[in-house]
């Protein structure tokens, strides 16, 4: 055990490991990249996190920086949960629900808490956390906060950022900051502090004021976005100020979250689900726009394409038996309403079916739980693609999660198909149609030099295409290492410089999740590409996306 590990083990309540098998296990997340950490730390409490951060800060002050990467269950597809220094793993100990207020529905949680366990606990109280990702069964709430995760319900309820009320965050120097929305008077008091926290408040406030017009116009014409830092939501017109939106979606690059107060919504298990069998791609955009215009919108508008359905039929024909049979429609859209009023649900469904019928689109409507579950299997067939193996060929999460304006949804689909055709690859597309946020994973062999070169050609072509369509490179899976090189082109150099200044304000020595989000070039990630790809650490739960 090296000197740093020895020191930490002496001063922490949690465990420190340097065994090669443990380090190798944490060298990968669900991305195609690999970095072996120097050691693993399992913090038992916030004090362990503080001591570790403080020690890393002191080393950095002496010119010996050692990065810290906060990690949940390693489901990150962008390379945001791997790092070369200290891997701080939260699910082992800091995995609890600390408090549930049944009156307000707010819940206080630790970052290593399994998302599904949180959801189950909320359901027993008639509540739920709507922006759950498809990886809910095997991911953590801390990972969801770090990525600003979202999922099938986001079209109605919004992303994780909309539900985080306040947090406790360990800063790079080991201080603890409690974030919440401050009044103008409270902000002035914070800026008067002589601590690192006070310095951060002064720097971020000055950055917003000096770049007021730029900060207020950072958004894209998309319904969700996890690229960059959400500096635009920090300061409101009334002068109130909240750093919470900056930390949510920052992937541990600004601070380490140790506790979060999360808002929830009333849960209604009774819903109406419509499957629309779309035989003409030209109707896709029209349907999405019409659904988004509704005064009582659906809680989900999901999609899978015929290529995915054909893939499933050819490789696992019984998976859709009795649900769908070939020839498959070009798209299947799943449209769900969860209004508490059965009358409202019925009214909404009737309106949607009438519209779909006008386009000569066949529909299936279900309200019974087991029948709805059958229809949802259509969307969940994406797991078959993610888990597919043939020799060394795997589905790789390298070009996915782009989001574009819904008005360009059909154009987006066409360009994705063109990209696959150009590279002689089999296409399969799924995702959140209501947000025009799509996922796709090309089948490639990382042991083949030609395919390894193709990885970066595909990455470059895909993300440049999304930017040209007026979209964001990441709707819900964040920047990490893979998408970080495109942030400057996405936002422009002036805004990117604001992001860099935010990073420096919180992490002047560059020890928090180094190499993620900011100051990342394509050439930085090329040497990190794995020699082979697998998601074996997720086989307890069929991987979803």
Image: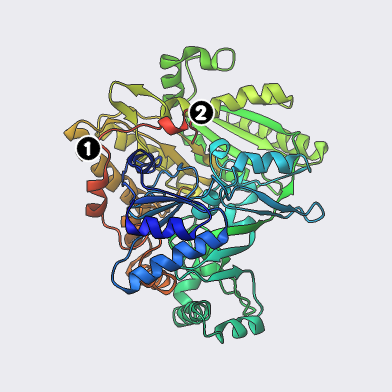
* Mark pair 2, 1: CA separation: 28 Å
For the question of whether residue 360 can be seen, the reply is no
Residue located at (53% from left, 55% from top): 13
Nearest the viewer among 494 and 199 is 199
Say which residue label 2 marks: 540
**Residue 289, above or below 174:** above
Between disc 2 and disc 1, the foreground one is 2
Q: Is residue 377 left or right of residue 61?
A: right
**Residue 263, above or below 533:** below
For the question of whether residue 482 can be seen, the reply is yes
- The dot on residue 452 is 1
Q: Is residue 154 left or right of residue 12?
A: right
Q: Is residue 421 left or right of residue 213?
A: left
Element on which disc 2 rests: loop
Q: Earlier in the sequence, mark 2 or mark 1?
A: 1
Percent across and percent down for residue 346 are 77, 34
Other-residue count near label 2 (Cα within 10 Å), few / some / many at <14 / 14–19 / ≥20:
few
């Amino acid at each position: 055990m090296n000197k740093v590990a020895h020191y930490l083990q002496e001063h922490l309540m949690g465990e420190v490991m340097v065994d090669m098998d443990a380090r190798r296990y944490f060298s990968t997340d669900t991305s195609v990249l690999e970095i072996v950490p120097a050691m693993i730390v399992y913090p038992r409490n916030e004090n362990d996190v503080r001591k570790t951060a403080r020690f890393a800060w002191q080393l950095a002050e002496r010119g010996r920086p050692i990065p810290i990467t906060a990690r949940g269950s390693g489901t990150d597809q962008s390379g945001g949960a791997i790092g070369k220094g200290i891997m701080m793993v939260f699910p082992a100990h800091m995995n609890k629900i600390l408090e549930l207020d049944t009156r307000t529905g707010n819940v206080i949680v630790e970052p290593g808490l399994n998302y599904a366990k949180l959801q189950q606990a909320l359901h027993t109280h008639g509540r739920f956390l709507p922006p759950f990702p498809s990886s809910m069964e095997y991911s953590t709430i801390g990972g969801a906060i770090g990525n600003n995760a979202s999922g099938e319900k986001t079209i109605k309820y919004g992303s994780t950022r909309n539900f985080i009320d306040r947090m406790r965050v360990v800063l790079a120097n080991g201080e603890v900051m409690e974030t919440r929305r401050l009044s103008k008077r409270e902000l002035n008091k914070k800026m008067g502090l002589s601590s690192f926290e006070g310095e951060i408040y002064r720097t971020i406030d000055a950055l917003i004021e000096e770049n007021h017009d730029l900060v207020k116009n950072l958004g894209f014409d998309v319904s969700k976005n996890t690229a960059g830092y959400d500096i635009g939501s920090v300061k409101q017109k009334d002068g109130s100020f909240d750093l919470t939106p900056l930390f949510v979606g920052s992937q541990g690059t600004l601070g380490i979250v140790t506790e979060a107060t999360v808002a929830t919504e009333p849960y209604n298990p009774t819903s109406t689900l419509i499957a629309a069998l779309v035989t003409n791609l030209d109707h896709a955009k029209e349907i999405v726009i019409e659904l988004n215009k509704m005064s009582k919108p659906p809680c989900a508008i999901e999609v899978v394409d015929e290529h995915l359905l054909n893939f499933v039929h050819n490789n696992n024909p019984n998976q859709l038996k009795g649900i769908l049979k070939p020839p498959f429609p070009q798209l299947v859209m799943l449209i769900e309403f969860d209004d508490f009023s059965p009358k409202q649900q019925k009214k909404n469904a009737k309106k949607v079916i009438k519209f779909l019928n006008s386009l000569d689109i066949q529909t299936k409507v279900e309200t019974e739980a087991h029948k709805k579950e059958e229809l949802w299997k259509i969307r969940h067939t994406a797991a078959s693609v993610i888990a597919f193996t043939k020799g060394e060929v795997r589905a790789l999460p390298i070009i996915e999660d782009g989001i574009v304006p819904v008005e360009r949804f059909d154009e987006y689909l066409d360009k994705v198909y063109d990209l696959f055709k150009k590279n002689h690859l089999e296409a399969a597309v799924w995702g959140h149609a209501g947000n025009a946020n799509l996922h796709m994973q090309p089948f490639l062999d990382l042991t083949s030099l030609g395919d390894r070169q193709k990885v970066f050609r595909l990455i470059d072509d895909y993300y440049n295409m999304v930017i040209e369509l007026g979209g964001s490179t990441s709707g819900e899976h964040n920047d990490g290492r893979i998408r970080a090189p495109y942030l400057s082109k996405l936002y422009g150099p002036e805004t990117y410089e604001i992001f860099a200044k935010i990073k420096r304000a919180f992490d002047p020595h560059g020890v928090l999740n180094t190499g993620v989000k900011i100051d990342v070039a394509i050439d930085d990630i090329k040497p990190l590409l794995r020699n082979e790809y697998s998601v074996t650490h997720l086989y307890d739960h069929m991987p979803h996306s």
